[in-house]
Amino acid sequence: MVGKKRISPSLRKVEQDGESEDDVLFLHRKIATTATLKRKNQTKKDVLTLDRTLLEAARNFDMNSETVMRHMKVSVYALNEVVERCIMEFLPVIPNRLHVEAVCRRWRRLSLEEMPVTELDFEQVALRPLLRRNVRLMLERAKQQLTKLVLPDITLVDAHIELIVQQQNLRVFRAHRMQKRHFFNILEHCASLQTLELMDCRALRLSGQRGWPRDAVALREVYLNECHFFTNQAARSLIKICGSSLEKVVFTGAMSLDSQVLRDLATYSVKMAKLTISSVNLRDIQTMTEGVGASLRWLDLSSCRDMSSFSVGDSTNLLHLQVLMLDKTKINDDGLRAIARVAPSLQYLSLQDCRVISDDGLATISEGCTNLELVDLKGTAVTDASIEALEAQCPRLRLVRVDSCRSVSREMRRKYNERALRILKGDKLSKCERIFAERKKIEMVAQTRRDSESDNESESDRDSDDDYAI
């Protein structure tokens, strides 16, 4: 045709492709619209079905549809409260429940009114320092229903003690520092108390005939740490009052005690299962082992530097003894032979810094204590021969600690150091491995503290030197 521009074949093909793309887009939109309409229709059908069901329920129960809907809302609301309450019950009061209470009024009401506080553990709070007022408010919230109370490192006053002695169901109590009159008040008024632990007793004088109250409750577990002024008379009063109910005793730093306390334990505490007495002037343990040996499972006499032997009678059998710690004592090979003879069930043996023992004593141990799982020989003079004997005779052996053992070969030390690292990094640990891991952590904390103190001393020395600098 005249005047009409001819279209090239390539342009014609592009236009055809564009038209085909438009058709495809239109087809997709049409399919999507149809699917949306179907979903809307199905939703309407579902709603109509639900309405029909609710109306039938209203006719059956002689209720109108509004009452049914209101009843459903109340049920859902009550169900929500049940779920929220169950979740809150799993949370410790400090600090998690306190965070939950700050979210809304309903959660605060649930926590305060419907869930009583039975355990308070202030050691779980990461924030420091805690105010005395906060501790008092939490004790008031308990409403005399506490069964466990772990206090922070604060100085307790009379107001705290008045609230504590009202807890008639209190079974576990732990504090850091206390006055003697406060201490006696708790022992006399908390009738259900079973476990008592004081972390720092250096200022607590428990001596003389009034070293322990006569009307005190009979305890099952007593932990007195750094009790420098705890005498034999006070210990005897405690042991006599608690009697056969006493099962676990920990006395550390009680430098006024001697072997008399062991004789008292043998006389009155026939159910003793765990005994820890460290840094005490002990020499003769034969009477104690004869009296409570049948029930004893854990014995820790670390840092009792006067003890050089493990004297036991001919008829003594420590059949149930599983854990024995004699760190920093003067135990010798004769003592190890006695242990091998009377403690066949031993699983954990710690002889850290026992410089007198030799390979001969360890060979006897490997023959008599074949159930050993962990042996701590840090800082001793043993050689590879002792470790090889333990490996050959003790099939359950997991670890031999040989830190600072200069007579042990480098290959042996490397092997067991790698095992120790695996244990410290592991999750599923045996009982003996957990004991080792906990003691290792305590050693690391103590070492860090000593390093910081030495750094402070060196800084003070530098400051004093600067004062004299010209």
Image (cartoon, rainbow, N blue to C red):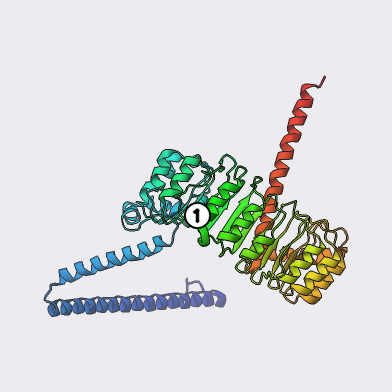
**Residue occupying image coordinates x 75% and y 53%:** 328
Q: Residue furthest top?
A: 470
**Residue occupying image coordinates x 75% and y 51%:** 306
Q: Residue furthest left?
A: 62
Give the answer, above or below, for where 131 lies relative to 403. Answer: above
The C terminus is located in which quarter? top right
Q: Is residue 276 left or right of residue 378?
A: left
In what element is the residue under mark 1? Answer: helix
Give the answer, above or below, for where 441 lies relative to 427. Answer: above
Task: Report crowding for label 1: few under 14, some 14 to 19, many 20 or more residues within 10 A (C-alpha).
Answer: some
Amino acid type for the residue under numbered disc 1: Ile
Q: Position of residue 271 (x, y in %)?
A: 56, 65
Q: Position of residue 401 (x, y in %)?
A: 77, 63
Q: Position of residue 326 (x, y in %)?
A: 72, 58
Q: Nearer the viewer, residue 366 or 208?
A: 208
Q: Nearer the viewer, residue 36 or 259?
A: 259
Whether residue 442 can be seen here: yes
User: For mark 1, what is the residue?
Assistant: 241
Q: Is residue 65 left or right of residue 96?
A: left
Q: Position of residue 402 (x, y in %)?
A: 80, 61
Whether residue 434 can be seen here: no
